Image (cartoon, grey):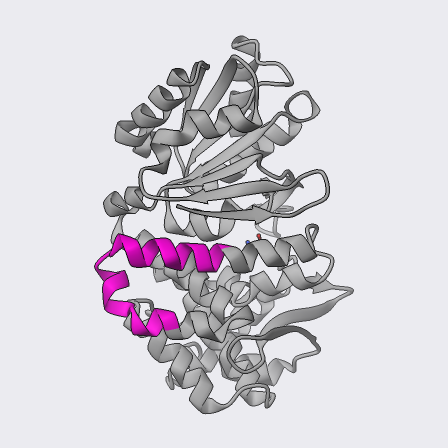
Amino acid sequence: MQTINVDLPQRGYTIHIARGQLDQLGKTTREVALHDRAMLVMDAKVAEPYGVVAKRALEDAGYTIVTHQLTALESRKTLSTVEGIYEAMLEAKLDRMSPVIALGGGVVGDIAGFAAATYLRGVPVIQAPTTLLAMVDASVGGKTGVNFPLPMDAAGRSELGKNLIGAFWQPRAVIIDPQVLTTLDMRDYRCGLAEIVKHGLIADASLLDFLAQHASAIGALDLDVLEDLIARSVRIKAAIVEEDEREAGRRALLNLGHTFAHAIEPIEALDLRHGEAVSIGMCAAAHCAVQTSRMTTDEADRLRDLLQALGLPTHLPREVDASSLIDTMGYDKKVASGKLRLILPRSLGAADIVSDIDRSILQSAWAAVGAGQTNEGC
Ligand code: GLY
């Protein structure tokens, strides 16, 4: 078992990583939330078998459990889904001491975390992620929230803006059981690997070496390797959160690749999941870094080769117009005072927030991953 402490004034907590850890959910929850009643919010997809295991573990620790199942889709990550949770909480007479346990991927963690942050002005939340992406990213650091419709366009259409409504609400504990990854869809599994690569790229070149050396064991879901990998990745995120809980500075580095990713992720014809879009986004960011002499071509190539070895895309599956992607990037939350801020790698294992990147460099970065006219790879 590996434990990692997130050291925050008054809001510190422990992340527990071990095979079989889900069986310990009740005991761990009991250590941080003394009460007799709790709500288990879970992805309907994991209700069998993990929901059953989690409920039993909580009941064995003396909790009366109210369960609430969600359909874990970005399109359902809305205030009306949160309202459904509030209604169930009120119905079950949950009070300010009643913990909420979020069992599922990032969508469930974000929704349940936001419900916990706001119900009766805040009740304890325990994150029990069941996807690799949620284990290494969403469950750690206290970001919770939902999507919200953007203002209508000229044609009267409105899209959901990602995570526009939310709160920082740190969990009381995070319970990571790598065993549950054995039943995860492989595409979703690889999406989690993209976020691990991102952590290495911004803060720890040796994690990138570890990924490269163990690529085949990782592909085969070797649980010993995975436990180490998750712990290394979570340590990086925890350290960044400790330094900058509210994203006033360094935490923004965790968005490397995401400004590019958010432009391609909503395009249905591309059929990209978040981690896949982040993988392509990291390649585009690396290209910008090469163009601005922050990274060598050799380093960008090593990044691309690693992503490919992990089964991740480094190129758009079909051509899209680079100019419209750049326009979409302008709507991202990372636009500060009208200027586009990007997170760019500095070599492998470091990154910075960079403003004022020329449109021509963005054009060339998008072209390098397959947008517009050229097809050069990253
Ligand atoms: N997923 C980025 C962050 O937690 O800040």
Is 50 magenta? The answer is no
Residue 219 lies in magenta, yes or no?
Answer: yes
The residues colored magenta run 210-234
Residue 335 placement (x, y as % from top left): 69, 63
In this rendering, would 20 be left or right of 344? left
Query: Residue 152: where, in percent of width, then height?
Result: 62, 46
Please identify the residue farthest to the right as the structure is shown.
Answer: 337
The percent coordinates of residue 91 (x first, y second) are 53, 9
Which residue is depicted at the point 33% across and 74% down? 212
Which of the pair 145/52 is nearer the observer? Answer: 52
Q: How many marks?
A: 0
Q: Residue furthest front?
A: 1
Quarter of the rendering containing residue 250:
bottom right
Viewport quadrant of the N terminus: top left
Q: Quadrant of residue 256?
A: bottom right
Vertical position of residue 352 compared to residue 47: above or below: below
Is residue 272 in view from this perspective? Answer: no
User: Ligand 1 is in which quadrant of the figure?
Assistant: bottom right
- Comparing 278 with 264, the one in front is 278
Q: Which part of the image, by quadrant, shows the C terminus?
A: bottom left
Question: Residue placed at 32% from the left, 43% from the top?
Answer: 19
User: Relative to residue 197, is residue 187 drawn left or right?
Assistant: left
Q: Quadrant of residue 13?
A: top right
Observer-nearest of 101 and 262: 101
Give above or below for 217 relative to 137: below
Q: Residue at x 55, y 57 (%)?
A: 237
The answer to whether residue 361 is visible is yes
**Magenta: main secondary structure:** helix
Q: Position of residue 94 (x, y in %)?
A: 57, 13
- Residue located at (51% from left, 79% from top): 348
